[in-house]
């Protein structure tokens, strides 16, 4: 966008909610199967198992809990 105002028939309160709705839809879809953005890439949920790590300050060994994170894979058309 170039900073120009875009007029819509929606009230300003509804327009302000659009990014939050998109975010909620992406989160729900990610949990189920992943989000594909055509020409850009794919977002997917990945899990990691529990593992050992080190406290960088004390050097003592700690157990890092299992977690889930979002990963992104770039579309092949953009890898060139």
Image: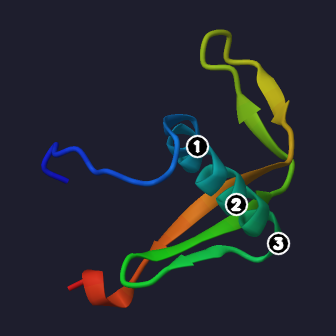
User: SS at mark 1?
Assistant: helix
User: SS at mark 2?
Assistant: helix
What residue is pinned by disc 2? 25
Left or right position of 77 against 18: left
Check the image and report above or below for 16 versus 75: above
Instruction: State the residue at coordinates (70%, 52%).
Output: 24
What residue is pinned by disc 1? 14
Check the image and report above or below for 19 versus 56: below
Quadrant housing the C terminus: bottom left
Gap in Å between the C-alphas at discs 1 and 2? 16 Å
The answer to which of marks 1 and 3 sits earlier in the sequence is 1
Give coordinates of residue 34: x percent, y percent: 68, 74
User: SS at mark 3?
Assistant: helix
What residue is pinned by disc 3? 32
Left or right position of 75 against 47: left
Gap in Å between the C-alphas at discs 1 and 3? 27 Å
The answer to which of marks 1 and 2 sits earlier in the sequence is 1
Q: Which mark is residue 64?
A: none
Give coordinates of residue 4: x percent, y percent: 16, 46
Taking depth in this image into account, of 60 and 66 the one nearest to the observer is 66
Q: Residues within 10 Å of mark 2 (few under 14, many from 20)?
A: few
Which label lies toward us, 3 or 2?
2
Q: Quadrant of residue 17?
A: top right
Instruction: State the residue at coordinates (52%, 42%).
Output: 11
Taking depth in this image into account, of 65 and 8 the one nearest to the observer is 8
The answer to which of marks 3 and 2 sits earlier in the sequence is 2
């Amino acid at each position: 966008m170039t900073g120009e105002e875009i007029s819509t028939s929606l009230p300003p309160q509804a327009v302000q909610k659009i990014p939050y709705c998109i975010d909620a839809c992406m989160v729900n879809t990610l949990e189920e199967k992943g989000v594909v953005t055509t020409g850009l890439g794919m977002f997917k949920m990945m899990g990691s198992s529990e593992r050992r790590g080190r406290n960088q300050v004390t050097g003592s060994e700690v157990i890092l809990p299992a977690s889930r994170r979002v990963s992104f894979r770039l579309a092949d058309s953009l890898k060139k």
